[in-house]
Amino acid sequence: MTAIDYQQIIEQLHHSLSAVEATGETADYIPELAQVDANQMGVYVLDQQGRCYQTGDWQQTFSIQSVVKVLTLCMAYSELGTALWQRVGMEPSGTPFNSLGHLEHEQGVPRNPFSNAGALVVCDVLMGLYDDPLAALLGLIRQTSGNPEIDVNPVVAESEKSEGHRNMALAHLMKSLGNINHDVDDLLDFYFNACSITLNCQDLAKTFAFLAHRGRCPQSDQHILDNSQSKRINAIMLTCGFYDEAGDFAFKVGLPGKSGVSGAIVALLPGHFVVTTWSPGLNAKGNSQRGLQFLEAFTTETGQSIF
Amino acid sequence: MTAIDYQQIIEQLHHSLSAVEATGETADYIPELAQVDANQMGVYVLDQQGRCYQTGDWQQTFSIQSVVKVLTLCMAYSELGTALWQRVGMEPSGTPFNSLGHLEHEQGVPRNPFSNAGALVVCDVLMGLYDDPLAALLGLIRQTSGNPEIDVNPVVAESEKSEGHRNMALAHLMKSLGNINHDVDDLLDFYFNACSITLNCQDLAKTFAFLAHRGRCPQSDQHILDNSQSKRINAIMLTCGFYDEAGDFAFKVGLPGKSGVSGAIVALLPGHFVVTTWSPGLNAKGNSQRGLQFLEAFTTETGQSIF
Amino acid sequence: MTAIDYQQIIEQLHHSLSAVEATGETADYIPELAQVDANQMGVYVLDQQGRCYQTGDWQQTFSIQSVVKVLTLCMAYSELGTALWQRVGMEPSGTPFNSLGHLEHEQGVPRNPFSNAGALVVCDVLMGLYDDPLAALLGLIRQTSGNPEIDVNPVVAESEKSEGHRNMALAHLMKSLGNINHDVDDLLDFYFNACSITLNCQDLAKTFAFLAHRGRCPQSDQHILDNSQSKRINAIMLTCGFYDEAGDFAFKVGLPGKSGVSGAIVALLPGHFVVTTWSPGLNAKGNSQRGLQFLEAFTTETGQSIF
Amino acid sequence: MTAIDYQQIIEQLHHSLSAVEATGETADYIPELAQVDANQMGVYVLDQQGRCYQTGDWQQTFSIQSVVKVLTLCMAYSELGTALWQRVGMEPSGTPFNSLGHLEHEQGVPRNPFSNAGALVVCDVLMGLYDDPLAALLGLIRQTSGNPEIDVNPVVAESEKSEGHRNMALAHLMKSLGNINHDVDDLLDFYFNACSITLNCQDLAKTFAFLAHRGRCPQSDQHILDNSQSKRINAIMLTCGFYDEAGDFAFKVGLPGKSGVSGAIVALLPGHFVVTTWSPGLNAKGNSQRGLQFLEAFTTETGQSIF
């Protein structure tokens, strides 16, 4: 395969998208996120040969938010294997990210690991596997990204805790149904800290590169997942990565990916590239508006998608 | 890319799967389907170069059932384009295939075109586009498959009508909510006839080849969809093709695909191959048990999937 | 107990309510009902001693609509006894009158006999008990009211049939789940005819008098239910008679009662009186707006309610 | 009306019910309740003239549990009047007592004040009205019952707190939706203490006598509610007092009433009597099995009900 020079494509798309005033809203339920300028946009592409392409606010840091759910899932899955699926499903739920939805009638087993409920269960699993799961998670991100400075932003974490009643409700509900083992306050502490890890588009692209390289991080040469596991994580991203907009993302973009309410999106074409975008204006479903527009145009322009 | 010789792989998998007594049940709500021997299994692979590989009961005919929903969707989408999505969504529903689920609270707009509700809306669209939509559908299948003998099995169609109360309920509900334009009895007549089209694994693989060839049928050279449309149909198959088992199929098999209660499954890797299986024993979700087992083993064995 | 002279009370209330322009809307989904003047209002009170009090448009005829569900229930219950409750529940549903709500997950057994679904099941029961259930129903109404002229209005019945897709959906859904035995078209024919029986406030009060007289019709001396059964029907009216406004009616009015989309309401205080109102302007829940206002004021004024 | 001598009736019913081994289960989710002997049964009747009738374990104390929800509702309603109904509805919910059910889609406004969610909102209201709402509640119970010894059982309260994750989930969910004003931990502390107030059948009957006396406590001559308010509380008890068994209780017993998981039931006929039963064996809906059997037989035997 001949390598594509993505630089011109991403600059052009960034330029045309930036020309329009952002209409999305920043997440208002986390005070610390609400204050960010919605017009910012960063893009970073890392291809299979290790070449990188970047434009806009790609050096600007942001909190990882729900994008971290893929990493915690990989950690839990690599340890537990298929036993993990007794605690959390892998089906699209057809409901918003913070829904209590089906939990009540399904014994507290979340439909998939990318809903908030599912991510809490995965965090509960990690608390059973690691003495200090946050340190383990930070270790993974620092090694794969090659950036030892990456850390939790305590102001964001505090901000999330102060407004975390919906997640408290989810955790207590699942605990009442027997699918949370650890103390709820400790669990939410870990979860909010994990969501508050702060990095930039480059860090994020490097961290996710292993999912485009059959489970191996090309920078650090760590084997995080085997090839089959890596494919399966990608499959879950495709079917569940964008909450009740997952079908739309698959239809328009055609890549496995995951979004966060800070406006971050990571998407990847196995064997080809990882692309990260960050733009904090969100659409009604809680996904970055410009990020989605960029990625749809990007896969149309390059003709590259999994389909 | 070097071509893989699939023959040995599919024979071996067919052999080992056939050695175990089928545990799935044939569909019991359609009398005509209930009588079939659940132990049968046919496989057919058609690769991008036009080579074909087949084993088992691949010449045995069966009714197409829900697999036809992909074809009616392609017909409606190629005519209406994005206007189609005002009548039916493209999100996984998280509910069984015949669910009335969300319809009541979502103005009769089905979540996706592969639920029964969604397929009925697509049929309603086709009734507005064609004087004789069944003839148009049969025409498409006969041309793409190259088999002019393919036709509706009237005994199966009658059998479905006699037990079609759930689909009647769906159609009347959507009509009461304004999302069905035509007479409900005529609509169901068309729908049940479409589901009762009878063919074999070879016919089905040839018919679906256009979705692995960027929308063009390699046998008849018809341009059924453009490349972008073809990718998008594949995306919908991946996220919604297996009802509330779609996530599981993406996870285990990693290919866009569609199943029917007759035990048929079609799956494809764009640019590489179409594979069809038929084995009438169904699992609890209504998908062919052996078909799923075969396809999981097939993509593991070949290392080929979209992820 | 000394008898109350209701005449002055009802005239005064009628007067003050009529002074305000009606804001309710006539039922728009049944063409024949939509054309009626929403400002009309009739009231009829029949006390335990047989004295009657009436005002306004009490002689104006209207279709009985859902009020008939109480009568069909009484007929089925007096024949089947407790066996009836295997086909339909007696719990408030918390959902609108035409909801498919819980049916799908509860084996097609409606929550109560006053939802449309529940009333259809009761009609299906009557079709098994009577050769001509419509004749039996008309016979009951004519005898208890003493008005042999009462009959179905065929224009209303036709009007309902033409828009009856929601009820068709309910009937087919329950048939698919095994809780409807008869042909769906025949069933709906009976149901729509029953709803289209036409009478006035006086007829309706006389027909319902047996529920205030321990099950015995004071005019015709028929024993329609025994005392215990009569109490139980009253209990179901109280908890389920006003769809998802049942709690509100119990709270504000404090009488067992039943409403219909034609704007009719019947309510009663066992051992004391039956009161019927008719005013076709409906509130958002599908209950007569002025009827509700009148009845709340009436029980406040007289100090008479079951609580 | 001539007074009925209830003594013989209740003794006979108690005798025949006690002859059968209790099949109900004690509440297992509150450790302290699980240990009680399910075969116990107490009955107390207090008639309008102040005569009392009692049998069995009527002096045995138990925690009031959900029966307290009526008292907290009366306190909040007498202060706020109709403004209360913006915070909590008055419709039967059609769901179990601890359901998160509709909350998610209805802005955190519970369907009625007798679900756990509704009771938590009422407690939140009381926390805004009183400096020490628990003291106010205890004051009301002590004065109306004439028993100054009544108090919280701290062991039960602790036991509830340790297993209170479902209620924590409800409170956090409503707080995230803006319908809880106070600190969730403080709220649950008040709620669990209120549920753990310990008394016997006599205390409970005396406490509830005001609802059979038009809002006035006949023992202490306190005016707790006016006549209209008292009727309305009775209406809510009738439609919502027994969770998803409310229709069944109205049908079989025909009295406004309220149950608790300790096995307590209070029921009353306005102008006639209050009856309390206590028997800790519960049916599948969480209501006292023998209590229900007793009350059905009691109203059948005496011929007294509101219908």
Image (tube, coloured by chain):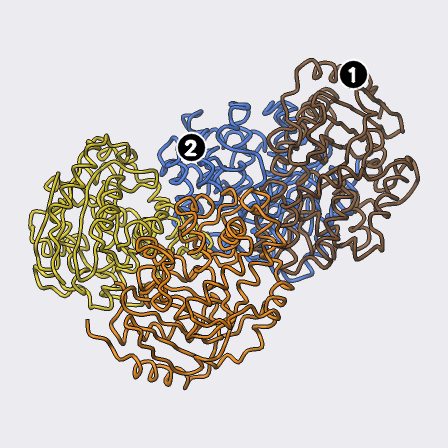
Chain colours: A brown, B blue, C yellow, D orange
The residue sitting at 31% across, 65% down in the picture is D254
Assess disc 1: are there few (<14), some (14-19) or many (≥20) residues with their C-alpha within 10 Å of its C-alpha.
Answer: some
Q: Can you give x and y, in whole percent of width and height, for residue D42 in the image?
A: 43, 79
Q: CA distance from mark 2 to mark 1?
A: 43 Å
The residue sitting at 41% across, 86% down in the picture is D19
Same subunit, tags 2 and 1: no
Q: Is A273 displayed left or right of D47 in the figure?
A: right
Q: Can you give x and y, in whole percent of width and height, for residue A139 in the image?
A: 88, 44
Q: Which residue matches tag 1?
A: A11
What is the count of numbered marks?
A: 2
Q: Can you give x and y, in whole percent of width and height, for residue B61 in the image?
A: 55, 46
Task: Determine the image quadrant of residue C12.
Answer: top left
Mark 2, chain letter?
Answer: B
Mark 1, chain letter?
Answer: A
Assess disc 2: are there few (<14), some (14-19) or many (≥20) residues with their C-alpha within 10 Å of its C-alpha.
Answer: many
| On screen, residue B136 above or below A80 | above
Q: What amino acid is labelled 2 in the image?
A: Asn
Query: Which quarter shows the C terminus of chain B?
Result: top right
Q: Residue furthest front?
A: D221
The residue sitting at 50% across, 64% down in the picture is D138
Q: Is residue C110 visible?
A: no
Q: Is B10 displayed left or right of D52 in the figure?
A: right
Q: What amino acid is labelled 1 in the image?
A: Glu
Query: Which quarter shows the N terminus of chain B?
Result: top right
Q: For numbered disc 2, what is the local secondary structure?
A: loop
Q: For numbered disc 1, what is the local secondary structure?
A: helix
Task: Determine the image quadrant of residue A26.
Answer: top right
Q: Is D114 displayed left or right of C210 in the figure?
A: right
Q: Can you give x and y, in whole percent of width and height, for residue C99 in the image?
A: 39, 46
Which mark, by number, is residue B179?
A: 2
| On screen, residue C207 above or below D64 | above
